[in-house]
Image (tube, helix red, strand yellow):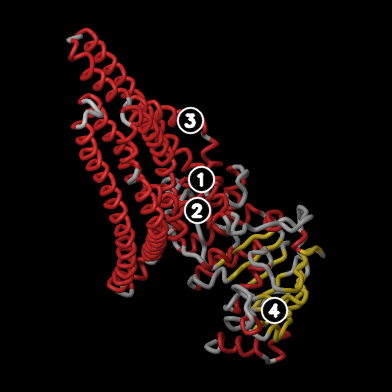
């Protein structure tokens, strides 16, 4: 852990060393006062040397002013160091999350991921600032105090140090259990964040189904789990803190008893005994500070472990020798492709979504996939841009295995319009320009015009600068869909995937959107997934898919004449007409 963590500290080693240097000087400054008190009691008071006492007071004031300045530096620049380190780790973590495969997000809740980006990194930041600083300062104070204590009276120091092995053994005993308890706490709080994120995202469904009470009950269960886990963590923390306080109190008792005996026997004078008590107080101060710091270190270490766990999740990688795809023409072929979701198991054959699929789509043609749910239609759409890895077989575009192409260059050639449109919380312009960040204002407006949304945008008070809200909820479903179409127009890909692009719209809006989609489809290879057969009657080829694979294929007229599965689907949808 320390080796990995030192990498982030090294980026800002100047601030880190400044923080430690100031902390060292602060710790050193505190060591002067007991020696001066000892000198005063043993020498200056008996001699009546007031001038020396005044000089000593002035020196102490200067030392404490310097200490004030040093503490200001520690408290400001030390926290700045922690923030910078947190920002570096957050940037690295976010960059890594952006490279993770889609399957990771299928299996992990958004709220849990957010907890690692926010809560965990905040604890790491606090640990990075206060942890090394406190440990270093306390170590300096302990070492210097121990040396000075030994110089005053080594026998008394040896007696005091007899308690340290017991304290060390106690720390070793409780450390593992406490770290485990904090780890469980982290897991529980991430679960709460995930539940809250889901509940807020689905608030309309909650209210529509009067599900407020159910959501509260779900939250209460997660919150109770967190409360229990946190209680366990504090149980060990209380045991640790109480135990360490007991050992420090024990040191005081030993010093008072043994020091009193030594004073009675004349083996130590009054000045030395007072100085010794002051140094013991200073010796115990860093011990207590370390006790207080331990919770911070425990939480930070737990957060860093979770950070490393997420960073260890493999990113999407290009295959060795993968080349830039350039501008693809769009001829797609599936060769004996098999695929299933999730991890491979011994019972893999029963989980297969696609089994030995062969399919050829000519460039510039429109192919529609129809059939019952679970046949793998959307899965095929996800495999072409390589969102998931196939189990076996090969997917070719223009005769090139997609594995031989870099992922980014492959996806630059593919445009996707899905049923569930996602718009980013920003302006209409920013969402359309997502298709081509380098596009000019004229190109953005031209894309919007092709998607038949430009005229509506111009009626808005802020025009293209109108904020769409979270997930675009300030716009209607049809408006969001048109913006997503404009985004693809701007991207200008050769391959277009329409995955239930109009199924969530009413008939009138669907007809309007369909015109935009037909305009978008011209000159491109188009793969359409649709349940409404009216939208795909003009497709060059229709493929009927079931869980057993391809059942039928041909034009709409050919399949109607065959009176097979497509004919039955057609009759069901149009029987009222």
Q: Earlier in the sequence, mark 2 or mark 3?
A: 3
Nearest to viewer (mark 3 / mark 1): 3
| Location of residue 283 in the rendering, given as x and y in whole percent from the top left corner | 31, 36
Residue holding disc 3: 17
Q: Residues within 10 Å of mark 3 (few under 14, many from 20)?
A: some
For residue 554, above or below residue 109: below
Q: Quadrant of residue 46?
A: top left
Picture coordinates of residue 43, whole percent (x, y): 23, 15
- Element under label 4? strand
Residue depicted at 60% across the width and 61% down the height: 101
Furthest residue in direction bottom, as rendered:
563
Q: Which mark is residue 89?
A: 1
Residue 542, disc: 4
Q: Are marks 3 and 4 in contact (CB under 8 Å)?
A: no
Mark 3 vs mark 1, CA separation in Å: 19 Å
Q: Earlier in the sequence, mark 2 or mark 1?
A: 1
Task: Give yes or no for contact between labels 2 and 1 (Cβ–Cβ under 8 Å).
Answer: yes
Asked whether disc 4 touches disc 2, contact meaning CB atoms under 8 Å apart, the reply is no
**Proximity of marks 4 and 1: CB atoms separated by less than 8 Å:** no
The span from disc 4 to disc 2 (Cα, nearest Å) is 47 Å
């Amino acid at each position: 852990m320390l080796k990995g963590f030192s990498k982030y500290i090294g980026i800002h080693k100047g601030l880190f060393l400044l923080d430690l240097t100031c902390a060292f000087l602060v710790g050193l400054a505190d060591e002067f006062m007991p020696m001066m008190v000892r000198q005063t009691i043993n020498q200056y008071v008996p001699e009546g040397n007031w001038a020396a006492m005044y000089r000593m007071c002035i020196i102490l004031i200067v030392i404490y002013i310097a200490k004030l300045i040093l503490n200001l530096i520690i408290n400001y620049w030390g926290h700045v160091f922690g923030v910078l380190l947190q920002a570096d780790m957050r940037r690295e973590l976010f960059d890594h999350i952006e490279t993770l495969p889609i399957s990771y997000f299928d299996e992990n809740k958004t709220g849990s991921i957010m907890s690692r980006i926010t809560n965990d990194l905040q604890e790491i930041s606090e640990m990075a600032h206060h942890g090394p600083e406190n440990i270093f300062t306390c170590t300096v104070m302990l070492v210097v105090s121990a040396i000075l204590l030994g110089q005053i009276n080594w026998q008394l120091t040896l007696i005091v140090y007899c308690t340290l092995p017991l304290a060390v053994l106690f720390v070793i005993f409780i450390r593992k259990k406490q770290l485990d308890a904090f780890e469980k706490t982290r897991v529980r709080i991430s679960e709460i964040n995930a539940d809250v994120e889901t509940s807020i995202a689905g608030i309309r469904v909650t209210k529509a189904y009067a599900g407020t009470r159910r959501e509260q009950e779900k939250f209460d269960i997660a919150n109770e789990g967190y409360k229990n886990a946190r209680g366990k963590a504090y149980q060990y923390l209380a045991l640790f803190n109480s135990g360490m306080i007991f050992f420090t109190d024990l040191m005081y008792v030993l010093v008072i008893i043994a020091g009193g005996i030594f004073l009675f026997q004349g083996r130590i004078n009054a000045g030395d005994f007072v100085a010794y008590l002051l140094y013991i107080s200073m010796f115990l101060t860093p011990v207590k500070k370390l006790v207080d710091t331990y919770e911070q270190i425990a939480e930070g270490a737990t957060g860093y472990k979770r950070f490393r766990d997420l960073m260890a999740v493999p990113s999407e990688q290009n295959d060795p020798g993968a080349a830039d795809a350039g501008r693809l023409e769009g001829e797609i072929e599936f060769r004996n492709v098999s695929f299933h979701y999730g991890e491979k198991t011994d019972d893999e054959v029963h989980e297969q979504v696609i089994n030995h699929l062969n399919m050829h789509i000519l460039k510039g043609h429109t192919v529609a996939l129809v059939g019952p749910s679970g046949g793998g239609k959307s899965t095929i759409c996800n495999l072409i841009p390589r969102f998931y890895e196939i189990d076996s077989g090969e997917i070719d575009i223009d005769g090139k295995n997609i594995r031989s192409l870099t992922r980014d260059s492959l996806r630059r050639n593919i445009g996707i319009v899905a049923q569930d449109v996602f718009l980013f919380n920003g302006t209409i312009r920013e969402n359309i320009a997502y298709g081509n960040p380098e596009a000019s204002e004229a190109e953005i407006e031209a894309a919007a015009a092709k998607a038949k949304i430009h005229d509506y945008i111009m009626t808005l008070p802020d025009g293209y600068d109108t904020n769409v809200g979270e997930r675009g909820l300030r716009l209607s479903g049809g408006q969001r869909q048109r913006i997503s179409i404009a985004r693809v127009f701007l991207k200008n890909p050769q391959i277009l995937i329409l995955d239930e692009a109009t199924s969530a719209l009413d008939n009138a809006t669907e007809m309007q959107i369909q015109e935009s989609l037909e305009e978008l489809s011209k000159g491109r290879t188009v793969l359409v997934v649709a349940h409404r057969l009216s939208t795909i009657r003009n497709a060059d080829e229709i493929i009927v898919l079931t869980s057993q694979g391809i059942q039928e294929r041909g034009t709409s007229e050919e399949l109607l004449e065959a009176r097979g599965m497509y004919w039955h689907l057609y009759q069901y949808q149009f029987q009222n007409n």
